[in-house]
Amino acid sequence: MSTKKEIINTMNAPAPIGPYNQAIKAGNTLYVSGQIALSPESGILVQGTVAAEARQVLSNLGAVLTAAGYSFADVVKTTIFLRDMDDFGAVNEVYGEYFTEQAPARETVAVAGLPKNVNVEISVVAWRA
């Protein structure tokens, strides 16, 4: 097991919009920074429904996981940040498309604001033996 931390960045997910990396791998654990609904190709926010935002967020997370050699099956913990808890059902439905079996531990919190005024942000922690 490696004891140094490895920085993970991929062009298949949006570039960080601040002084952070898309993910850090430490040993067998991958810590993926919160993703919002930015298109990696254009850098433009996905507009429309909160479900469309959630789908782009999860796509971005998937790209970072893949770049590090992980998958959604390796995710052990997620944190969902919502601007409005009334969006929980729509986000949860999309979330369930990505986590179908052995869902990770999770918390969902309502926050006063999110980067770029988005409706949803999700971060994950993944682990592989």
Image: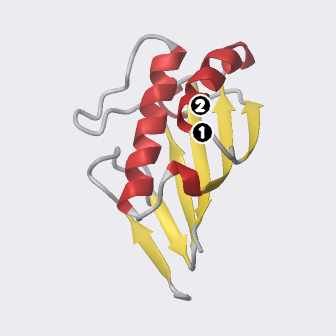
Pick whichever, 43 or 28, lies toward us.
Answer: 28
Q: Residue at x 52, y 88 (%)?
A: 2
- Classify residue 126 by image quadrant: bottom right
User: Tag 1, which secondary structure?
Assistant: loop
Q: Residue 27: x and y, percent?
A: 57, 80
- Which residue is identified by label 2? 95
Q: Are marks 1 and 2 in contact (CB under 8 Å)?
A: yes
- Which residue is identified by label 1? 99
Would residue 93 be found to the left or right of residue 52 on screen?
A: right
Would residue 15 be found to the left or right of residue 77 on screen?
A: left
Of all residues, the one furthest to the front in this rendering is 101
Mark 2: amino acid? Tyr
Q: Residue 16: x and y, percent?
A: 40, 50
Q: Quadrant of the C terminus?
A: bottom right
> Would you call the spot at circle 1 few (<14 residues within 10 Å), some (14-19), or many (20 or more)?
few
Colouring style: secondary structure
